[in-house]
Amino acid sequence: MMKKITIAIDGHSSCGKSTMAKDLARTVGYVYVDTGAMYRSVTLYAMRHGLFRADGSIREAELEAVMPDIHIDQRLVDGKTVTFLNGEDVERDIRTLEVSSHVSPIAALGFVRSALVAQQQRMGSQGGIVMDGRDIGTVVFPHAELKVFVTASAQVRAQRRYDELRQKGMAADYDDILRNVEERDYIDSHREVSPLRKADDAILLDNSQMTIAEQQQWLLERFHEAAG
């Protein structure tokens, strides 16, 4: 019987990490955790409660004071992972471009990251988990048995995001999305706390020219190598 391992999938925004991680978890019978959705949920909470000023800056002291009141959990609903914020299904609300354009400054706050990292480490303490995000292999699970760092060109990622939003019937503008992707790359890579970077022992996957099926096959092979 294979041992249950921890799988950390990191990478840039809109490069298909979540799709890969969800499919792998379903295929091998592991639990999937979408950490990006957790940061998006904190962002949505802050937007709803007026914790962003008109200039886009965050009322940090007020947000830090209410962090203990922000409860995020993820549940399987009809075979899909759904994110709940204080008991409310917010899966659709957290995927809007408005949330996307506010999430990086929230994710750069040390007190937000430490609160969510502690929660993520509790979730994955027993192994048998696939977690994707920006700092899973470097901060959350530095000893994960399998670490993958996913990337693709900004243009490819913007097109994928555009197509995804249109398929959901949501308004989308390619140029706005490309700007958002490039801004998030810069903020994520340059923030002081847990910046986005490839762990030294992570396997690099550039999926710019790969189909989803090719990615899944590649990832499944890496899983069997690590868990075997």
Image: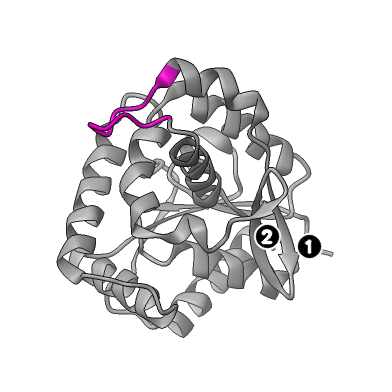
Q: Where is residue 106 in the image (x, y as percent from the top left)?
A: 40, 34
Q: In this view, does 19 lie to the left or right of 192?
A: right
Is any atom of residue 122 visible in this view? yes
Circle 1: residue type: Met
Q: Where is residue 58 in the image (x, y as percent from the top left)?
A: 36, 27
Q: Quick one: quadrant of the N terminus? A: bottom right
Q: Is residue 206 left or right of residue 128?
A: left
Q: In this view, does 26 lie to the left or right of 114?
A: right
Above-or-below relation of 105 to 62: below
Q: Give the magenta range.
A: 51-60
Does the magenta portion include 32? no
Task: Give whichever of 116, 97 is nearer the camera.
Answer: 97
Q: What element carries label 2?
A: helix
Is any atom of residue 142 visible in this view? no
Task: Give whichever of 80, 102 is nearer the camera.
Answer: 102
Q: How is the image coloured?
A: one colour
Q: What's the distance in space between the residues labelled 2 and 1, CA to CA? A: 6 Å
Spot the residue most to the right: 1
Above-or-below relation of 204 to 140: below
Residue at the spot x=78%, y=56% of the render?
3
Q: Where is residue 180 in the image (x, y as percent from the top left)?
A: 23, 54
In the rendered image, which quarter is residue 70 located in? top right
Which residue matches tag 1? 2
Above-or-below relation of 212 to 54: below
Q: Is the magenta stretch mostly helix, strand or loop?
A: loop
Which residue matches tag 2? 227
Q: Earlier in the sequence, mark 2 or mark 1?
A: 1
**Mark 2 touches mark 1? (CB < 8 Å):** yes
Circle 2: residue type: Ala
